[in-house]
Image: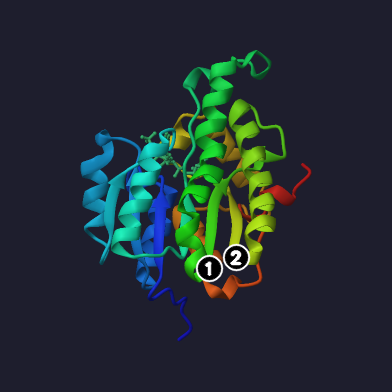
Amino acid sequence: MYQIDLRGRHALVMGVANHRSLSWAIAQLIAQAGARVCLTYASERLKSSVEELAATLPHAFTTECDVTKDYEIDEVRKKIEGRWGSLEMFVHGIAFARKEDLEGSFVATPREGFQLALDVSAYSFINVTNRVLPLLEKNGASIVTLSYLAANRAVPNYNVMGSAKAVLEQSVRQLAYELGPQRIRVNAISAGPVRTLAARSIAGFTTMEEMFEQRSPLHRHIDSDDVGAAAAYLLSDDAQNVTGTTLYVDSGYHAMGM
Ligand code: NAP
């Protein structure tokens, strides 16, 4: 039987908050395919729940990393270097915007709200990649980040997070170009709505889900395992000639004009 094989590979997976997190679905699938996984969580508050999840995966370990703090990212690199010596996969499943910046008027977005959302949700992708680059370069690697259609369409209430996703997808293309010669591939998955902690902070999320079911060509909700399977493919050698792209896992919703 054909199966994705990630044995002997090491993965940094950022953005696990709980069992609903898209990063957790990815971590589970790539661990099943044989990868060793390092899960990071944003703060002490999440430590015990992420440790509990990690304990269900063979050879996984966890560590704290707030991506707004460079020294915490460097600590992650040092820990991975000490244990594994190389990284063949990096999964970025991190986004944050203040609640008020996702509810009010986009035109009135304050500078601090804009900077914070872009820093956590987009710059962190570039910055973490750069700080773990020596590990990614050793054997070549595949990087995946998580995006949403608001990167290139206007979506009510998505506001500053749409700006962050636009920057994120541009970063995917630019990093793919720059890191290709080092055998590092860089891709994004643009996912349809899935009920996670981050999704709950988007006002009108339920309406978004209803529209999605009505209007997507497949008339079907996606779940976190759909994202996990697409990520496992992009992270594997099956996607060895795929880089700089955004793969839509959204029942075809992005293809519609009405
Ligand atoms: P999630 O479980 O809430 O994951 C988001 C993660 O980002 C959380 O673990 C969160 O930690 C973390 N984070 C926030 N600020 C951080 C910081 N400063 N440092 C480190 N980590 C930080 O929600 P999710 O839906 O799985 O989101 C994962 C990614 O998928 C996001 O980029 C999101 O935009 C994208 N996405 C989601 C959907 C959807 O419908 N769910 C659709 C398309 C794309 P805290 O909980 O501590 O803040």
Q: Is residue 10 above or below residue 212?
A: below
Q: In the image, is residue 18 above or below residue 230?
A: above
At numbered mark 2, what does the secondary structure look like: helix, strand or loop? Answer: helix
Q: Which residue position holds label 1?
A: 140
The image's colouring method is: rainbow
Rendering coords of residue 141 (x, y %): 52, 65
Quadrant of the image occupied by residue 225: bottom left
Q: Residue at x 41, y 45 (%)?
A: 15
Q: Residue at x 62, y 59 (%)?
A: 179
Q: Is residue 166 left or right of residue 198?
A: right
User: What is the x, y in percent for residue 43?
Assistant: 30, 35
Between 144 and 101, the residue placed more toward the observer is 144
Crowdedness near tag 2: few (<14), some (14–19) or many (≥20) residues, C-alpha within 10 Å: some
For label 2, the residue is 182
Q: In the rendered image, which quarter contains the C terminus?
A: top right
Horizontal placement of 57 versus 185: left or right? Answer: left
Against 160, residue 76 (above or below) is below
Q: Residues within 10 Å of mark 1 (few under 14, many from 20)?
A: some
Of 250 and 13, nearer the camera is 13
Q: Nearer the viewer, residue 159 or 240?
A: 240
Q: Residue at x 59, y 14 (%)?
A: 110
- Residue 1 occupies which quadrant of the picture? bottom left
Q: Mark 2 to mark 1: distance in Å?
A: 6 Å
Q: How far from the left and from the top, in percent, is residue 28?
A: 36, 61
**Is residue 11 in sight in this rendering?**
yes
Amino acid on which disc 2 is placed:
Gln
Nearer the N terminus, badge 2 or badge 1? 1
Given contact means CB atoms under 8 Å apart, are the residues at marks 2 and 1 in contact? yes
* Quarter of image, res 61: bottom left
> In this orientation, does residue 103 appear?
no
Q: Position of residue 77 (x, y in %)?
A: 38, 52
